[in-house]
Amino acid sequence: MSRPITCIGAGVIGGGWAAYFLARGFDVVAWDPAPDAEARLRRTVDAAWPALTELGLDDGADRSRLRVAASLAEACAEAAFVQESAPEDLELKRGLLADLVAATGPDTIVASSTSGFPMTDMATEAADPSRLVVGHPFNPPYLIPLVEVAGGEATAPTVVKEAAEFYRSIGKSVIEMDRELPGFVANRLQEALWREALHMVANGEATVEQIDTAITEGPGLRWPVHGPCLTFHLAGGEGGMAHMLDHFGPSLKAPWTRLGAPELTGELRDAMVRGTTDEAGARSFADLVAERDRAVIAIRRAVEGARAG
């Protein structure tokens, strides 16, 4: 890609994206209306560079390839791809995305880092919403691989595919969503855990430290390996997800959370069983257990080493 990547917004997310694109060997042009934006952006890139260097820099990676434009139009003049990371304000996003569409060429994809707004809601003022897509990262974008890609009602399907392929080509792990969902996938899961934590603290049921320990020393060690679904698949023993749901399904009605549980219909049960079977693929139950155990030991050792300095 000979044309530069444009980063609109130089805060924590925009700065993290700029650092990541630079590490992948791109020229990056950034713009942010704040008077101290350039200084903040360069501090963010400098702070991220040691971690990016440790992870491995692509050919051509160089912080000197960052340029800060004086205007949005200048930043977008030659953009091959635009990553918008403005504050999470719907009216601001609508106007800004419309401006970005107007300032870029007909082949330029404009991706929003929004953490929850559906693109259909944000694209209402754009003259050509077909080029607008959500590219939601996780903080910090230079370190966490996940990007959730989702189009709006007017987004061209090819744009969703092209955006997803672009992110994959630069080393991101992509969830290419089949439909719009406020908050997307990861934030909805994260938010459910966060809200329950707030309930427990508010009601004096657990301390902040107890809640954090419950995750870091408990299920959090398994999630990087298999995620919640395959983790519960293993909880069913050799019977897998089917046994787990049949045995523990009634506990969905127990008062273990303030969230209402969906009805465990036969259709939902079978979908979960199929999904975990497909995800496990050729790996047997024993294979998955061994994989989990090796990874959890490695994660524990890595975390302990990091804490020890």
Image (cartoon, rainbow, N blue to C red):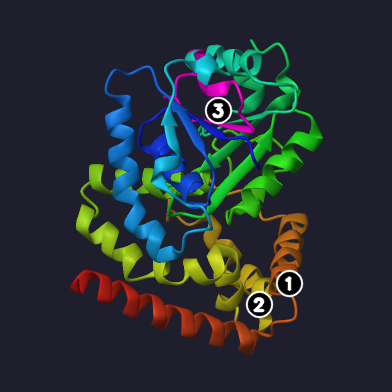
- Report how far apart the C-alphas of labels 2 and 3 lie in the structure: 36 Å
- Residue drawn at x 70%, y 21% as measured from the top left: 105
Measure how far apart labels 2 and 1 are at the Cα level.
9 Å
Residue 78 is covered by the magenta coloring: yes
Residue 106 in view (yes/no): yes
Which amino acid does the dot numbered 3 rest on?
Answer: Phe
Residue 167: horizontal and vertical position, in percent?
A: 62, 48
Would residue 133 be found to the left or right of residue 308 on screen? right
Which quadrant holds residue 82?
top right
Discs 2, 1 touching: Cβ within 8 Å: yes
**Which residue is under mark 2?**
240
**Mark nearer the N terminus (2 vs 3):** 3
Q: Which residue in the protein does label 1 denote?
A: 277
Mark 2 / mark 1, whichever is N-terminal:
2
Q: Nearer the viewer, residue 219 or 35?
A: 35
Magenta stretch: give its range: 75-91
Mark 2 vs 3: CB contact within 8 A: no
Can you say which quadrant of the picture contains the C terminus?
bottom left
**Residue nearer the viewer, 21 or 188:** 21
- Give the CA separation, mark 1 to mark 3: 32 Å
Residue displayed at 73% across by 38% down? 160
Q: Is disc 3 placed on a helix, strand or loop? A: loop
- Left or right placement of residue 52 versus residue 306 in this view: right
- State the residue position of label 3: 117
Q: Is residue 214 above or below residue 302?
A: above
Q: Is residue 217 magenta?
A: no
Is 166 located above or below residue 14 in the figure? below
Q: Secondary structure at mark 1?
A: helix
- Please say if the residues under marks 1 and 3 sit with CB atoms less than 8 Å apart: no
Query: Could you tell me residue 148's position as x and y percent?
Result: 60, 44
Amino acid type for the residue under numbered disc 1: Thr
User: Is residue 245 left or right of 95 when viewed as pictured?
Assistant: right
